[in-house]
Amino acid sequence: MKTKTSTEQAEKDFERCQAWLKKLIPNEWDKFDLKAEYDSSITYDENKSAIREKIKPFLKDNLKEQVEEAKAAQERLETEAKQRAEAEVEEYNSKITYQTNQEVDKYYEPIYRAVDKVCRGFSHLLFCKGRPGTGKSWNIRRTLVENKTDFVEVSGEVTEAYLYRLLYENNGKTIWMKDISNLLNGIKSIQILKAATETEDARVITKSNYSKQQADLPDRFVCKCKFIFDYNQIQNKLREDFEALISRGDFLEFTLSPKEMEHVMRQIAKTPEEKEITEFVINNFKGSGLVRLNLRTQWKAINTYKYAQALGLDWQKEIKTELSRVSKVRALLYGLIGNEAVRRVELKKLLLKHELVSSVRQAEVRISEWLFTDELFEISTTDLRNGFVSLVAREEWIEREEKEKLMGD
């Protein structure tokens, strides 16, 4: 016969067991008949073990439900984050105002025309290549916004697996890809892009074997996207495939000479302060070989001026100090050749002499890499094997030589 104390303990154990059950299967606990299954003749721990075996089906269903709920919650958060980001971009684009300046706009006419052709549906593929800091991307955005184009801007890394989803989820939009060199070096991504940019009316692209990432996507769909590739350089390993892709659309190599760059910089300087800063930058760093004059250089100098003014510093000194902090490569080359032009063989000798390379072959490879990345420039146009190279672009070099000749005469 149970005592009052043992009865009270059994009731407490039952309540503890019920509380444990609610935590274990919060959405299913009331479907389990705990009173019928609870054995007051055994201990609380023994009851838990016995009940755990009996509720395994509930646990599996509950776990599945929790996973689905978690997945749905994550998808909701990702969707909301994406919507916020898209809304922020749309708001940013809607607030951008562009002022017409014929003196500046004439240099960017090739970009306006090429992008406008895409916006109006007379082309669905554009490759726009050019050096950084020339205003290339700014004017691509300007043309897209002024045409009220439904576009999505993509930059950074895009994997081959994600490309199919990117096209499907943005089908019908203009996809503006900025500096996505990795995408143009993968055979699968190039094949997808080739299919997506075919000159036929129906451009059908097919899903690759990325089953886990693409299980929710159709196996194929008709692509209605238009593409703009905006980049500085691409060291492409798949030349034939890449050229086949380029042949499906328009290709524009946008360049500005040093003199044109200076003119643009002077034209976009609005206030007296900006004009003074721009002249200071041009006069102090033009032809130095260390600093590249472009719109980014100007923008940095203007912000450095504001910083100096806020702290009561000498703005000219601050700009000189900041602009002198160049890349390691240009600093190294400037220490070897200054702003002079030297033959390739002489530069190879200097690299070997200073033990910066271990062989002539390595020196040749380094020089080729620096020429490719615009750390060096070809001055010669005929003798490319042993021609002159310099830190200064060829156009600027010729201009400097002409001025020196006039002064000498």
Image: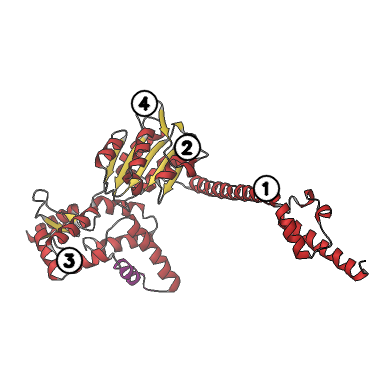
Mark 1 Cα shell of 10 Å, populated few (<14), some (14-19), many (≥20)? some
Q: Secondary structure at mark 1?
A: helix
The type of colouring in the image is secondary structure
State whether residue 353 is above or below residue 168: below
Q: Nearer the viewer, residue 291 or 355?
A: 355
Disc nearer the start of the sequence (3/4): 4
Number of callouts in the render? 4
Q: CA distance from mark 4 to mark 2?
A: 18 Å
Q: Which residue range is magenta in the image?
A: 313-324
Check the picture and name the quadrant holding the C terminus: bottom left
Eye-nearest disc, 4 or 1? 1
Residue at mark 3:
357
The amino acid type of the residue labelled 3 equals Val
Q: Residues within 10 Å of mark 2 (few under 14, many from 20)?
A: some
Q: Amino acid at mark 2?
A: Tyr
Residue 259 in the image: state x and y as whole percent.
Answer: 23, 52
Residue 183: in sight, yes or no? yes
Is tag 2's residue or tag 3's residue first in the polypeptide sequence? 2
Q: Nearer the viewer, residue 284 or 170?
A: 170
At x 42%, y 42%, the residue is 163
Q: Are marks 4 and 1 in contact (CB under 8 Å)?
A: no
Which residue in the structure is indicated by mark 2?
Answer: 168
The residue singled out by tag 1 in the image is 61
Tell me the chief SS of the magenta region.
Answer: helix
Check residue 264 in the rendering and tell me which mark sits there, or answer none.
none
Q: Are marks 1 and 2 in contact (CB under 8 Å)?
A: no
- The mark found on residue 200 in the picture is 4
In this rendering, the answer to whether 96 lies above or below 247 is below
Q: Is residue 282 left or right of residue 123?
A: left
